Image (cartoon, helix red, strand yellow):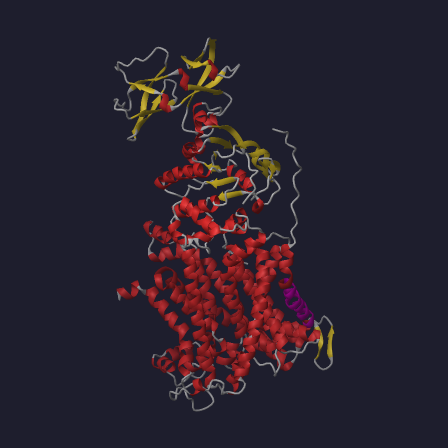
Amino acid sequence: MRWVRGHLVTIAALLVMCYMLLPNVIVIAFSFNQPKGNYNYEWQRFSLDAWTNPCGTPGMCDALGLSLRIGLVATLVATIFGTMVAFAIGRHRFRGRSSTNLLIFLPMATPEVVMGSMLLTLFIAMGIAPGTITILIAHILFCLSFVVVTVKARIASLDPRLEQAAADLFANPLQTFVRVTLPLVAPGIAAGALLAFSLSFDDYIITNFNASPSSVTFPMFVWGAAQRGTPVQINVIGTVMFLTALALVAAGQLISNRRARGAAA
Amino acid sequence: MPDRTSGDLRLAGVTKTYDAFTAVDQLDLVIPRGSFFALLGPSGCGKTTTLRMVAGLDQPTIGQIWIGDRDITETKAYERNVNTVFQSYALFPHLSVIDNVAFGLRRRKVSNYKAKAMEALDLVQLAHIARKKPGQLSGGMQQRVALARAVVNRPDVLLLDEPLGALDLKLRRQMQIELKRIQCEVGLTFVHVTHDQEEAMTMADTIAVMNAGRLEQVGDPATLYEHPRSTFVANFLGQSNLLEATVTSLAGMTADLDVHGVNLRLPLDRLANGASSVWLGVRPEKLRLVLPGSTDVGGGAGNRLSGVVTDASFTGLATNYLVRLPWGQELMVVQQNDGMPRAASGEHVTLDWAPEHGFALDADQDAHAGAQDRADDSGAT
Amino acid sequence: MEVTVVPPPRPARRSYTPYLLLLPGLAWLVVFFVVPTLSLASQSLQTGDVDNGYVQTWHVQTYLDALSRYWPHFLRSIAFAGTATVLTLLLAYPLAYFMTQKAGKWKNFLLVLVIAPFFTSFLIRTLAWQTILTDNGPVAELARSTHVTDALQWMRLTSNDSLMNSRFAVICGLTYNFLPFMILPLYASLDRLDHHLVEASGDLYATPVQTFWKVTWPLSLPGVVGGTLLTFIPAAGDYINSRLLGNTQTVMIGQVIDSEFLRVQDYPTAAALSFVLMFVIVLIVAVYVRRAGTEELI
C-alpha cells in the first residue's frame, strides 16, 4: 500500500498513457479484422485481407492521394510565408508589431466551424466554386499561424551573439543568414512544416465547408464511411500513419539529441 | 589577407549615448600597434561598449575610430580588420571546431584556409580536437578555440571581452600566461577588457582605467599602481590607505603634512603645485608593523603612526592586519610571512614607512571611489 | 595628432526588410481571414435566401431568433468543452509531471509516444472509440459488472445503459482528442521547473502536498493557462465527437452552424450563430486570462 502511495504519480501517469494509446492500439488491432457486416466494431477473426488489398475500397486511395497533394502544397506555401513572417516579427522592430502578433494569433483561436463558414461565405461572394483550390487556400490559411508560432519560438531561443560573431568574422548579412542563422533555425522550420502537414492532412471541418463532391479528401472519405460503413482499409491507413509518425518523430528526436550534444556551447 | 596599412588604434572623442544615459564620454585613447593593452574598470564603466564600437558591433554617437591613417568609424563590422573573442565564446554550435576556426578565412576567400586553421589550432594546442563540436568541449577548450578563431585572421586589432571570466582560478592563471605568450609570438595588437585588476596588471603592457564612461588614468601597471592620480585608481588597483592631510610647510625636497596632529613627510615632487589639503595615500604592503619592545627602531626619516591591532588574518603568504589609529580610522597593513613575529588583536603597534612610498591626491575626491566597486564586482560586465 | 572634426549624429536608417518579409503572409491573412470575418459579420445582418439573393438590412432580429432557438446547444457546447478541459487537465498534469520530474532517460521516449498519435488521423482514432465503448466489448462489460454504468446512468451520462452514443462517450472522445494540447504546454512549463525549488521547499518544512500547491502549481500556471486555452477553444466549436459518439441529445453548436450553412442554407442565421460563438469564446477566454493574470501569453 505504501508503495502505491509513493508511486501515485507514476501509476496515474501510466494510466493516462494507456488511455491515450488505447485507440491507436485498437486501430492497429482491428486492421487485422474481418468483420461480418459493414461496420468494424466487433472482432470476428484475424485476416490479412485489408493489408494485402489496401486500395480495395473504391475512392479511398484517390482521397488519400488528394490529401497528400494538398498537404504538400499547403505545407510548402505556409512554411515559406510563415517563416518569413516569423523572421519579420522575431528579428525586426516595426510599427504594428503587436497588432501583427494578434492577427497571427486570431486564426488559432477561431473555432474551425467559424473559419470554415467564413471562407465559404467569401468564396461564394467572390464567385469561386468550392473545390480543390478553395480547400488549398483554406489549409494555407490555418497552417500559417502555426508555422509562425513554431518558428518564432525557435528564433527567440537563438543567441544573437552568434550572428554578431559571424559579422565580426567578415560575414556580410546574407552570409550570416545562410551560414549561421538558417542552419540554427532549421529545426524550428522543420517542426513547423511537420505541424502544418499534419494539420492539413487531418482536417475535416474546414475542408468539408469548402469542398465539392469531386474533391474528396481522406478525412472526408472517412467521415462518409462512418455513415455508410467503415472498411477495414481505413484501419490499415491509420496504422501506417501512426507508424510513420512514430518513425518521423523518433528520428526528429534523435537528430535534435545529436545536435544538442554538439550545441551545448 | 588584409592590407598592411595597419597602425595604432586611435579613438578620438568617442561618445556613446542611449537616450539620457551616457555609456562612453569623450574617450580619447591611443593604443600602440603590437602592444597588449587592457581596458580596466568596474561593471558598467563603458569598457565593453568601447570594445563593441571598435569591433563595429555598435556605432559611436559622436567621435571617430582610426586604425593607422584609416578612419573606420563608418565601416561595417564585417568589413573591418578587427576580430573579437567574445565573453561567451559564441562558437557556432552547428560547426565543428576546425570549421569554426576557418569561418573568417573562408568569408575572406583565403585559399589554404584548412592549413591556416590547423596552424591556429596548433598555436592553442588543440589540433587534436579539430573534428569535435563545441558542445563536446570544456570551458577552457572553448575559450582557446574562440581565441584561435580570432587570431587566425591576423587582424589589425584583436579584441578580448573578459574572455577568462567563466574559468576557474587555476585555469584562468594558466590562460593569462598563454594569452601573453601568443600575443608575443604573433605580434598582434591585443585589447583586453576586464574588471579584474590583477589580471590586467599581470598581462598588459599598458592599462587604461575607466570609470563611468571616462578615462581615469592610462599607463603601465607599475606607474598606475605606485603613482595613482585619483582615489578611484588608488582604490581600484590594489588597496590604498588614505589619510586626511594638510600641507604645513614645503622645505627643500620634502613637504611636511599634518595628519591629525602627527607630522608626516612626502617628497615634494609627489605633491601637486599649490595643493594645501590632500589625501595622503600609502599602500598596505609598504607599511611595516613594529611590535613594542622590538629593537628595530629604523631610520629617523621614516613616517610613524601608532595604533591598536583590531584584526589579524593569517593567509599563509602574508598576514593582513587592521590597525586602529587614535582618531578612529583603520589602516590596512599587509605583512609578508618572512618569519618575523606576528602581532595579535589588541596589541599596540607602530607603523613605519618610507616617505617616498606615499602619494598625494586632491582632497576634493571621494575617498571611497573605486573601493566599493571592487567589493561588489562579482564578475558581471 | 590632428584636430578631430566631430561629425553630426547619424540618423537611424529605416529598413524595409520587415515589411517585405511580412507581405505575403499578412496579405494572405488579410484577404482570407480579416475580409471573411467582416463579410460574415455583414452576412449575419442580411435577410433573404439562397434562391432570391441577400439584402443588407441590418436585421438584428436574426441574432435574437438564433439565440432563442439554439441557446441549449450553446450551453451544452460550453458545458461539454468545459468538462473536457477540466478532465484533460486532471489527466494531463500527472503525466506531464511524471515525464519532466520522474522519467529521467525515458523522457524523450514518452514525448514521442505523446506526440505520435497526434499526427495520425483524428477521425480514425475517434472512430476507434466506437469500438472501445461498444456494448458487447470488454470495456462495457467491465463497467456493467463494476456498476460504473449504473453510476453514470444516475448522472444521466449514458443512454439506455449504453456507454456508446451517449454524453459519456462524447466527453470521453473530447477529452481524448485534446489531451496532447494540454500535455505539451504543461510539459514545457514543468520542464523548466527547477528541482532545487522543490528541495528548498522541503527544507523549509513544507509537506509534499504543500510543496505542490505553494511551489509547483503556481510555477506551472503559464502551462496550465496555455493548455486550457488550447483545449477549450477548439473543443467548444467541435462537433465531430458529438456526431460520431453521441446522439440527438448531444448536438453541439458546431453541428448546428454546419447544418445551417450546408443543409438548411440559412446563411444569415448561420453567420449570426458563428459570431455569437466567437464572442462567447472570446469573452470566456478574456475573463479567464484576466483572472489567471497571464495576459502576456497572447
The number of numbered discs placed on residues in the rendered structure image is: 0
Image vertical order of residue B274 relative to residue C193, above or below: above
Residue B4 lies left or right of residue B94; in this view the side is right
Q: Residue at x 45, y 64 (%)?
A: C184
Image coords of residue C35 (percent x, y): 67, 67
Image coords of residue A75 (percent x, y): 56, 69
Q: Residue at x 31, y 22 (%)?
A: B309
Q: Is residue A224 magenta?
A: no
Image coords of residue C224 (percent x, y): 46, 61
Decide if residue A264 is in sight here.
no
Image vertical order of residue A116 relative to residue B80, above or below: below
Image quarter where the N terminus of chain B lies is top right
Residue C244 lies left or right of residue A10; in this view the side is right
- What residue span does the magenta drawing correspond to? C26-43
Furthest-bottom residue in this view: A36
Residue B202 lies left or right of residue C298; in this view the side is left
Q: Is residue C29 magenta?
A: yes
Image vertical order of residue B106 relative to residue B205, above or below: below
Q: Residue at x 42, y 13 (%)?
A: B265
Q: Quadrant of residue A71?
A: bottom right
Image coords of residue C198 (percent x, y): 36, 54
Of C277 and C17, which appears nearest the observer?
C17
Q: Quadrant of residue B75?
A: top right
Predominant SS of the magenta segment: helix
Decide if residue A225 is in sight here.
yes
Image vertical order of residue B298 relative to residue C119, above or below: above
